[in-house]
Image (cartoon, grey):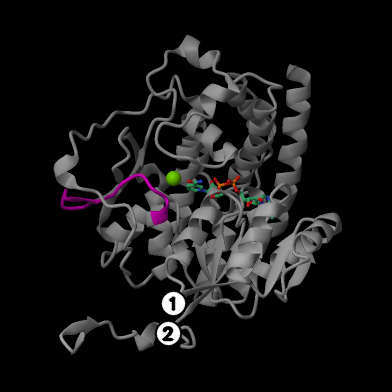
């Protein structure tokens, strides 16, 4: 602080001035979703340190993408197809912003690998994240990873490429962000268990009969988080926690049998690390995804978050913990078993789950059909051990077809 005429004048921090190379230049795939939007809020609050250079979004969100373009002026954007590109151009008709509008898988990859960016935020949902994430790692980009499905489906391929290219994945998923923070300075060999916390979802206190009859509306009513529909249904089945075990396994190169799940309904403890000496370190905060997003965007630095969510420990009444109920939530057990394998089973679990959840959201199947149909797909799958990318791409297509056929036979 420098004093002039008795008034404090804040000096501009040159290390973070926009023209300086320390400015983070960010590409986002999935910018119009729950994570993408919150990331842009964080970036908007730190425009002297963070800059958006490329955006990609899916269908049905062009109005929002146009608004984002007007506010953040990226160099390039990508949309799913030519029709969407034309519609976007029309929406931007009156603006003077110069940008390239790209389309399809190639456009998505161009955004992920944009030469101006040094960080890619993967906020896209599902297996669609695999190829652009791989392309970005090949170009040496740091990845802020929200798109857990990419690590679930192709964890070993992604992590070995990260190693080869000497780049990093910074988790955005709140549990993995918590563990990343708790691990700071420790070796994996110091750890006895990773503890993933979960809210328990909207059906935590429901009995089996109530769960069996749960509607789409019931499943979309998450007690703590406002998220995209797919992950919200995964949170209701507890598949989300199962996918997170697989995500953690690859991200931290950790024995999946030593990854534990505990239900923490208040969602204040975001996850914890138990060390070999018995000590447990946890990360606490309000249940707000802007916190792990902020952490990932600024890593390895900590930055002030003036209007960010703040937890006052004196106002906490209680923190409670429960063992997950595998009988009422069989998807967690199914994923926990698959997590032990290094095979195409995780990709099949993930891709089949995407199809099955979509069918539930369209009210073509009941909530209780989700684990049943998943098990049927997995039972029919001929695993390939230590899969390469081709095996994964093949398993993805197979799982989608198989899940669709099983669902068709069910209804
Ligand atoms: P969402 O459905 O709200 O948003 C998905 C975004 O991806 C949208 O912008 C959509 O337009 C875009 N998209 C979808 N398919 C696309 C395609 N083929 N090409 C280009 N863009 C495409 O989802 P979300 O809740 O933001 O979740 C995103 C990812 O983050 C998921 O993998 C989810 O598991 C993970 N995640 C989300 C949360 C959360 O709080 N929402 C928390 C932890 C992890
Ligand atoms: Mg999570």
Q: Which residue is drawn at 47% across and 30% down?
A: 333
Label 1: which secondary element: loop
Q: Residue 21 carries which label?
A: none
**Residue 205 found in image quarter:** top left
Q: Residue at x 49, y 38 (%)?
A: 240
Looking at the rendering, the stretch of residues picked out in magenta corresponds to 275-290
Label 2: which secondary element: loop
* Quadrant including the C terminus: top right
Q: Name the residue under label 2.
A: 17
Question: In the displayed structure, would residue 229 be above or below residue 101?
Answer: above
Q: Camera-side residue: 365 or 312?
A: 312
* Quadrant including the N terminus: bottom left
Left or right: 159 with respect to 136? left
Find residue 11 and report its horizontal and vertical position in percent.
Answer: 29, 86
Find residue 364 and report its horizontal and vertical position in percent.
Answer: 71, 22
Q: Name the outermost residue toward the top.
A: 209
Confirm if mark 2 falls within 8 A of ligand 1. no
Question: In the displayed structure, would residue 208 be above or below residue 390?
Answer: above
Q: In which quarter of the image is ligand 2?
A: top left
Q: Is residue 253 visible?
A: no
């Amino acid at each position: 602080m420098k004093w002039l005429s008795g008034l404090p004048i804040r000096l501009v921090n040159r290390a973070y001035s926009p023209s300086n190379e320390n400015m983070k230049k960010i590409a986002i795939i999935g910018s119009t979703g729950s994570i993408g939007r919150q990331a842009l809020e964080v970036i908007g609050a730190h425009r002297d340190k963070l800059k958006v250079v490329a955006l990609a979004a899916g269908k049905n969100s062009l109005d929002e993408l146009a608004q984002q373009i007007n506010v953040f002026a990226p160099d390039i954007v990508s949309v799913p197809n030519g029709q969407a590109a034309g519609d976007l151009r029309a929406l931007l008709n009156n603006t003077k912003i110069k940008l390239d509008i790209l389309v399809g898988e190639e456009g998505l990859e161009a955004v992920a690998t944009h030469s101006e960016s040094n960080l890619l935020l993967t906020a896209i949902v599902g297996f669609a994240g695999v190829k652009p994430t791989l392309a970005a790692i090949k170009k040496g980009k740091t990845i802020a990873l929200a798109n857990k499905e990419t690590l679930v489906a192709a964890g070993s391929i992604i992590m070995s490429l990260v190693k080869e290219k000497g780049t990093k994945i910074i988790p955005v998923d709140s549990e993995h962000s918590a563990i990343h923070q708790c691990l700071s300075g420790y070796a994996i060999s110091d750890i006895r268990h990773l503890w993933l916390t979960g809210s328990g979802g909207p059906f935590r206190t429901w009995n089996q009969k109530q769960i069996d009859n749960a509607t789409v509306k019931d499943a979309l009513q998450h007690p703590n988080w406002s998220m995209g529909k797919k992950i919200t249904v995964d949170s209701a089945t507890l598949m989300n926690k199962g996918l997170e075990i697989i995500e953690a396994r690859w991200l931290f190169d950790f024995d999946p049998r030593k990854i534990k799940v505990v239900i923490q309904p208040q969602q204040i403890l975001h996850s914890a690390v138990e060390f070999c000496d018995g000590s447990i370190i946890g990360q606490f905060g309000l249940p707000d995804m802007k916190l792990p997003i902020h952490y990932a965007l600024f890593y390895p630095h900590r930055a002030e978050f003036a209007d960010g969510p703040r937890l006052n420990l004196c106002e906490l009444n209680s923190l409670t913990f429960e063992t997950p109920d595998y009988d009422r939530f069989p998807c967690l057990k199914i994923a926990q078993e698959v997590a032990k394998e290094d095979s195409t089973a995780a990709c099949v679990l993930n891709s089949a789950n995407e199809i099955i959840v979509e069918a539930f959201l369209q009210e073509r199947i009941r909530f209780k059909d989700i684990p049943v149909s998943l098990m049927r797909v997995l039972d029919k799958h001929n695993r390939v051990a230590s899969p390469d990318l081709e095996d994964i791409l093949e398993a993805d297509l197979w799982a989608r077809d198989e899940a669709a056929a099983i669902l068709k036979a069910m209804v």
